Image (tube, grey):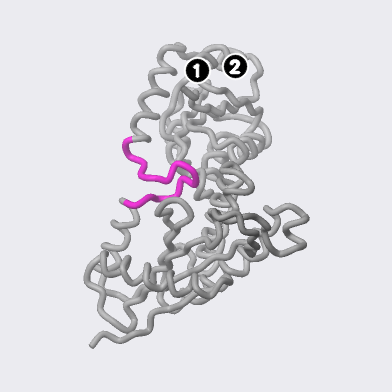
Amino acid sequence: MKKPRILIIDDDPDILDVLDLTLSDKFEVVLAHHGGEGLEQARRTCPDIIITDYMMPVMAGPEFCKELRKDVLLSHIPIIMLTGKGDIKDMVNGINAGADDYLIKPFEPESLVARINMIMQRTIRNLDANPLTHLPGNASIMEKLQELIREDGTFAVGYCDLDKFKLYNDKYGFEKGDEIIKATARIIIQAAQEVGGSDAFIGHIGGDDFVFTCKDELADQVSERIIGLFDKTIPEFYSAEDRAAGYIAGKDRQGNETRTGLMSISIGIVSNAFQKISHVAQISEIGAELKKFAKAQEISNYVRDKRKAP
Protein backbone atom coordinates (compact mmCIF):
# COMPACT_ATOMS: atom_id res chain seq x y z
CA MET A 1 0.00 0.00 0.00
CA LYS A 2 1.31 3.44 -0.97
CA LYS A 3 2.35 5.64 1.95
CA PRO A 4 0.69 9.04 2.37
CA ARG A 5 3.02 11.92 1.50
CA ILE A 6 3.88 14.51 4.15
CA LEU A 7 5.67 17.81 3.54
CA ILE A 8 7.69 19.16 6.49
CA ILE A 9 8.85 22.79 6.43
CA ASP A 10 11.31 24.02 9.08
CA ASP A 11 14.51 26.06 9.01
CA ASP A 12 15.99 24.01 11.88
CA PRO A 13 17.83 20.98 10.41
CA ASP A 14 17.62 19.16 13.77
CA ILE A 15 13.82 19.45 13.78
CA LEU A 16 13.71 18.21 10.18
CA ASP A 17 15.85 15.20 11.13
CA VAL A 18 13.68 14.36 14.14
CA LEU A 19 10.44 14.62 12.18
CA ASP A 20 11.91 12.66 9.27
CA LEU A 21 12.94 9.82 11.61
CA THR A 22 9.62 9.94 13.47
CA LEU A 23 7.39 9.86 10.39
CA SER A 24 9.34 8.04 7.66
CA ASP A 25 7.99 4.61 8.69
CA LYS A 26 4.40 5.63 7.97
CA PHE A 27 4.81 8.47 5.46
CA GLU A 28 6.72 9.43 2.37
CA VAL A 29 8.54 12.47 3.75
CA VAL A 30 9.35 15.59 1.70
CA LEU A 31 11.49 18.31 3.34
CA ALA A 32 11.74 22.07 2.84
CA HIS A 33 13.68 24.75 4.74
CA HIS A 34 11.35 27.74 4.46
CA GLY A 35 7.88 28.64 3.22
CA GLY A 36 9.00 29.61 -0.28
CA GLU A 37 10.67 26.26 -0.83
CA GLY A 38 7.66 24.63 0.81
CA LEU A 39 5.32 26.15 -1.80
CA GLU A 40 7.52 24.82 -4.60
CA GLN A 41 7.55 21.34 -3.05
CA ALA A 42 3.79 21.41 -2.45
CA ARG A 43 3.11 22.26 -6.10
CA ARG A 44 5.57 19.64 -7.31
CA THR A 45 4.65 16.75 -5.00
CA CYS A 46 1.03 17.51 -3.93
CA PRO A 47 1.38 16.15 -0.36
CA ASP A 48 -1.47 14.67 1.67
CA ILE A 49 -0.63 16.78 4.73
CA ILE A 50 1.83 19.56 5.63
CA ILE A 51 3.70 20.37 8.85
CA THR A 52 5.21 23.86 8.93
CA ASP A 53 7.12 25.90 11.47
CA TYR A 54 5.74 29.29 12.49
CA MET A 55 8.94 31.38 12.40
CA MET A 56 11.13 30.89 9.32
CA PRO A 57 13.28 33.04 7.00
CA VAL A 58 12.16 33.96 3.45
CA MET A 59 8.53 33.03 4.14
CA ALA A 60 7.12 32.33 7.61
CA GLY A 61 4.43 29.78 8.42
CA PRO A 62 1.39 32.10 8.32
CA GLU A 63 2.44 33.57 4.95
CA PHE A 64 2.96 30.04 3.59
CA CYS A 65 -0.55 29.06 4.70
CA LYS A 66 -2.12 32.09 3.05
CA GLU A 67 -0.32 31.44 -0.25
CA LEU A 68 -1.19 27.75 -0.26
CA ARG A 69 -4.87 28.46 0.34
CA LYS A 70 -4.92 30.65 -2.80
CA ASP A 71 -4.09 27.65 -4.99
CA VAL A 72 -7.33 25.86 -5.89
CA LEU A 73 -5.56 22.55 -6.50
CA LEU A 74 -3.70 22.64 -3.16
CA SER A 75 -6.04 24.57 -0.87
CA HIS A 76 -7.58 21.35 0.48
CA ILE A 77 -4.31 20.09 2.02
CA PRO A 78 -4.45 20.08 5.85
CA ILE A 79 -1.70 22.01 7.67
CA ILE A 80 -0.30 21.55 11.18
CA MET A 81 1.71 24.52 12.43
CA LEU A 82 4.58 24.11 14.91
CA THR A 83 6.07 26.84 17.06
CA GLY A 84 8.36 27.25 20.01
CA LYS A 85 6.11 29.97 21.38
CA GLY A 86 3.12 29.45 23.61
CA ASP A 87 1.65 32.84 22.87
CA ILE A 88 -2.10 32.71 22.18
CA LYS A 89 -1.64 35.50 19.61
CA ASP A 90 0.67 33.29 17.51
CA MET A 91 -1.78 30.42 17.72
CA VAL A 92 -4.65 32.64 16.57
CA ASN A 93 -2.53 34.09 13.74
CA GLY A 94 -1.65 30.61 12.54
CA ILE A 95 -5.25 29.39 12.55
CA ASN A 96 -6.48 32.58 10.87
CA ALA A 97 -3.85 32.16 8.17
CA GLY A 98 -5.23 28.74 7.30
CA ALA A 99 -3.61 26.19 9.60
CA ASP A 100 -5.89 23.31 10.63
CA ASP A 101 -4.10 22.52 13.89
CA TYR A 102 -1.35 23.84 16.13
CA LEU A 103 1.37 22.13 18.16
CA ILE A 104 3.88 23.79 20.52
CA LYS A 105 7.51 22.64 20.56
CA PRO A 106 8.81 20.56 22.21
CA PHE A 107 6.19 17.89 21.49
CA GLU A 108 5.88 14.16 21.95
CA PRO A 109 6.22 12.25 18.67
CA GLU A 110 3.21 10.10 19.58
CA SER A 111 1.11 13.23 20.03
CA LEU A 112 2.11 14.53 16.61
CA VAL A 113 1.35 11.21 14.89
CA ALA A 114 -2.06 11.13 16.59
CA ARG A 115 -2.81 14.66 15.42
CA ILE A 116 -1.76 13.80 11.86
CA ASN A 117 -3.93 10.69 11.74
CA MET A 118 -6.93 12.54 13.15
CA ILE A 119 -6.67 15.42 10.66
CA MET A 120 -6.14 13.13 7.66
CA GLN A 121 -9.16 11.00 8.55
CA ARG A 122 -11.28 14.11 9.01
CA THR A 123 -10.07 15.54 5.70
CA ILE A 124 -10.85 12.34 3.80
CA ARG A 125 -14.36 12.26 5.27
CA ASN A 126 -15.12 15.90 4.63
CA LEU A 127 -13.42 16.40 1.30
CA ASP A 128 -15.50 15.69 -1.75
CA ALA A 129 -12.81 16.06 -4.34
CA ASN A 130 -11.53 14.33 -7.42
CA PRO A 131 -8.42 12.36 -6.38
CA LEU A 132 -6.43 13.49 -9.43
CA THR A 133 -7.20 17.22 -9.66
CA HIS A 134 -8.60 17.77 -6.14
CA LEU A 135 -11.35 19.88 -7.67
CA PRO A 136 -14.82 19.57 -6.12
CA GLY A 137 -16.51 16.31 -7.14
CA ASN A 138 -20.04 15.31 -8.00
CA ALA A 139 -21.63 15.92 -4.60
CA SER A 140 -20.26 19.48 -4.49
CA ILE A 141 -21.27 20.06 -8.11
CA MET A 142 -24.83 18.95 -7.40
CA GLU A 143 -24.97 21.19 -4.34
CA LYS A 144 -23.70 24.17 -6.37
CA LEU A 145 -26.25 23.63 -9.15
CA GLN A 146 -29.07 23.31 -6.63
CA GLU A 147 -27.89 26.53 -4.99
CA LEU A 148 -28.00 28.35 -8.35
CA ILE A 149 -31.55 27.12 -8.99
CA ARG A 150 -32.68 28.15 -5.50
CA GLU A 151 -31.26 31.67 -5.89
CA ASP A 152 -33.56 32.16 -8.88
CA GLY A 153 -31.12 34.40 -10.73
CA THR A 154 -29.64 34.07 -14.22
CA PHE A 155 -26.72 31.66 -14.45
CA ALA A 156 -24.72 29.57 -16.91
CA VAL A 157 -23.18 26.12 -16.52
CA GLY A 158 -20.40 25.03 -18.86
CA TYR A 159 -19.83 21.31 -19.46
CA CYS A 160 -16.31 20.65 -20.77
CA ASP A 161 -15.20 17.41 -22.42
CA LEU A 162 -11.97 16.41 -24.17
CA ASP A 163 -12.14 15.02 -27.69
CA LYS A 164 -9.81 12.17 -28.79
CA PHE A 165 -8.51 11.78 -25.22
CA LYS A 166 -8.80 7.96 -25.26
CA LEU A 167 -6.65 7.76 -28.39
CA TYR A 168 -4.01 9.90 -26.69
CA ASN A 169 -4.10 7.58 -23.65
CA ASP A 170 -3.72 4.53 -25.87
CA LYS A 171 -0.54 5.88 -27.46
CA TYR A 172 1.12 7.83 -24.66
CA GLY A 173 -0.09 5.91 -21.58
CA PHE A 174 -2.17 6.72 -18.52
CA GLU A 175 0.49 8.77 -16.75
CA LYS A 176 0.65 11.19 -19.66
CA GLY A 177 -3.14 11.11 -19.79
CA ASP A 178 -3.27 12.14 -16.13
CA GLU A 179 -0.97 15.06 -16.95
CA ILE A 180 -3.45 16.16 -19.62
CA ILE A 181 -6.32 15.99 -17.10
CA LYS A 182 -4.40 18.10 -14.57
CA ALA A 183 -3.34 20.60 -17.23
CA THR A 184 -6.96 20.90 -18.37
CA ALA A 185 -8.06 21.50 -14.78
CA ARG A 186 -5.59 24.37 -14.43
CA ILE A 187 -6.68 25.83 -17.77
CA ILE A 188 -10.35 25.85 -16.75
CA ILE A 189 -9.50 27.28 -13.33
CA GLN A 190 -7.39 30.04 -14.88
CA ALA A 191 -10.00 30.98 -17.48
CA ALA A 192 -12.97 30.84 -15.11
CA GLN A 193 -11.24 32.88 -12.42
CA GLU A 194 -9.76 35.44 -14.84
CA VAL A 195 -13.12 36.13 -16.46
CA GLY A 196 -15.65 35.10 -13.81
CA GLY A 197 -13.75 36.20 -10.72
CA SER A 198 -14.73 34.93 -7.29
CA ASP A 199 -18.24 34.01 -8.47
CA ALA A 200 -16.88 31.23 -10.72
CA PHE A 201 -17.11 27.61 -9.60
CA ILE A 202 -15.08 24.77 -11.14
CA GLY A 203 -15.78 21.07 -10.61
CA HIS A 204 -14.43 17.77 -11.93
CA ILE A 205 -17.20 15.32 -12.80
CA GLY A 206 -14.67 12.56 -13.50
CA GLY A 207 -12.31 11.38 -16.23
CA ASP A 208 -12.02 14.13 -18.84
CA ASP A 209 -15.33 15.79 -17.90
CA PHE A 210 -15.35 19.14 -16.11
CA VAL A 211 -17.94 21.77 -15.26
CA PHE A 212 -17.83 25.47 -14.49
CA THR A 213 -20.50 27.94 -13.44
CA CYS A 214 -20.50 31.70 -13.82
CA LYS A 215 -22.72 34.64 -14.61
CA ASP A 216 -24.59 34.04 -17.86
CA GLU A 217 -23.17 37.09 -19.59
CA LEU A 218 -19.60 35.84 -18.97
CA ALA A 219 -20.01 32.22 -20.10
CA ASP A 220 -19.05 32.82 -23.75
CA GLN A 221 -15.93 34.71 -22.73
CA VAL A 222 -14.92 31.99 -20.24
CA SER A 223 -15.39 29.35 -22.95
CA GLU A 224 -13.34 31.29 -25.48
CA ARG A 225 -10.55 31.72 -22.95
CA ILE A 226 -10.57 28.01 -22.12
CA ILE A 227 -10.37 27.09 -25.80
CA GLY A 228 -7.55 29.57 -26.44
CA LEU A 229 -5.47 28.27 -23.53
CA PHE A 230 -6.22 24.63 -24.33
CA ASP A 231 -5.30 24.85 -28.01
CA LYS A 232 -2.07 26.66 -27.10
CA THR A 233 -1.05 24.33 -24.25
CA ILE A 234 -2.06 20.79 -25.20
CA PRO A 235 0.14 20.34 -28.32
CA GLU A 236 3.17 20.51 -26.00
CA PHE A 237 2.10 17.15 -24.55
CA TYR A 238 2.62 15.45 -27.92
CA SER A 239 5.92 14.33 -29.41
CA ALA A 240 7.60 16.73 -31.82
CA GLU A 241 6.79 14.33 -34.66
CA ASP A 242 3.07 14.12 -33.86
CA ARG A 243 2.89 17.83 -33.17
CA ALA A 244 4.43 18.66 -36.55
CA ALA A 245 2.15 16.20 -38.34
CA GLY A 246 -0.94 17.46 -36.52
CA TYR A 247 -2.26 13.94 -35.97
CA ILE A 248 -1.57 10.55 -34.36
CA ALA A 249 -1.05 7.64 -36.75
CA GLY A 250 -2.31 4.23 -35.63
CA LYS A 251 -4.52 1.27 -36.40
CA ASP A 252 -8.15 0.60 -35.62
CA ARG A 253 -9.51 -2.70 -34.27
CA GLN A 254 -9.65 -4.12 -37.78
CA GLY A 255 -5.98 -3.33 -38.36
CA ASN A 256 -6.64 -0.47 -40.75
CA GLU A 257 -4.32 2.55 -40.70
CA THR A 258 -5.90 5.59 -39.09
CA ARG A 259 -5.00 9.23 -38.54
CA THR A 260 -6.49 11.07 -35.59
CA GLY A 261 -6.09 14.80 -35.05
CA LEU A 262 -4.73 16.33 -31.87
CA MET A 263 -6.99 16.69 -28.87
CA SER A 264 -9.61 19.41 -28.74
CA ILE A 265 -12.07 20.54 -26.10
CA SER A 266 -15.85 20.79 -26.47
CA ILE A 267 -18.00 22.97 -24.22
CA GLY A 268 -21.77 23.02 -23.88
CA ILE A 269 -23.23 26.05 -22.11
CA VAL A 270 -26.52 25.54 -20.30
CA SER A 271 -28.29 28.73 -19.28
CA ASN A 272 -31.60 29.74 -17.77
CA ALA A 273 -31.55 33.04 -19.67
CA PHE A 274 -34.03 31.73 -22.24
CA GLN A 275 -35.84 28.97 -20.37
CA LYS A 276 -36.72 28.10 -16.80
CA ILE A 277 -34.55 25.47 -15.17
CA SER A 278 -36.15 23.88 -12.13
CA HIS A 279 -34.00 20.84 -11.33
CA VAL A 280 -30.40 19.65 -11.64
CA ALA A 281 -31.23 16.70 -13.92
CA GLN A 282 -32.51 19.20 -16.48
CA ILE A 283 -29.12 20.95 -16.51
CA SER A 284 -27.16 17.72 -17.01
CA GLU A 285 -29.51 16.49 -19.76
CA ILE A 286 -29.18 19.72 -21.74
CA GLY A 287 -25.43 19.78 -21.11
CA ALA A 288 -24.98 16.24 -22.47
CA GLU A 289 -26.95 17.14 -25.61
CA LEU A 290 -24.93 20.30 -26.21
CA LYS A 291 -21.60 18.53 -25.69
CA LYS A 292 -22.59 15.89 -28.24
CA PHE A 293 -23.32 18.60 -30.78
CA ALA A 294 -20.06 20.43 -30.01
CA LYS A 295 -17.98 17.25 -30.30
CA ALA A 296 -19.31 16.68 -33.83
CA GLN A 297 -17.42 19.80 -34.98
CA GLU A 298 -14.02 18.03 -34.45
CA ILE A 299 -12.29 21.24 -33.33
CA SER A 300 -12.25 23.04 -30.01
CA ASN A 301 -15.52 24.93 -29.78
CA TYR A 302 -18.47 25.76 -27.59
CA VAL A 303 -22.20 25.81 -28.16
CA ARG A 304 -24.89 27.56 -26.17
CA ASP A 305 -28.49 26.53 -25.73
CA LYS A 306 -30.70 29.46 -26.78
CA ARG A 307 -33.92 27.56 -27.16
CA LYS A 308 -36.90 29.16 -25.50
CA ALA A 309 -39.22 27.00 -23.46
CA PRO A 310 -42.75 26.80 -24.91
* Left or right side of 243 for 283: left
Element under disc 1: loop
Q: Magenta part of the protein: which range?
A: 125-138
Asked whether residue 27 appears in the rendered view, the answer is yes
Labels 2 and 1: the sequence-earlier one: 2
Secondary structure mainly formed by the magenta segment: loop
* Residue at x 56% of width, y 28% of height: 7
Asked if residue 168 is among those painted magenta in the image, a careful observer would answer no
The residue pinned by badge 1 equals 105
- What amino acid is at disc 1? Lys
Asked if residue 137 is among those painted magenta in the image, a careful observer would answer yes
Which of 107/237 is in front? 237
Residue 86 horizontal/vertical position (percent): 46, 22
* Residue at x 45% of width, y 57% of height: 209
Which of 106/194 is in front? 194
Please tell me whether residue 191 is drawn above or below residue 47 in the rendered image: below
Marks 2 and 1 close (CB-CB < 8 Å): yes
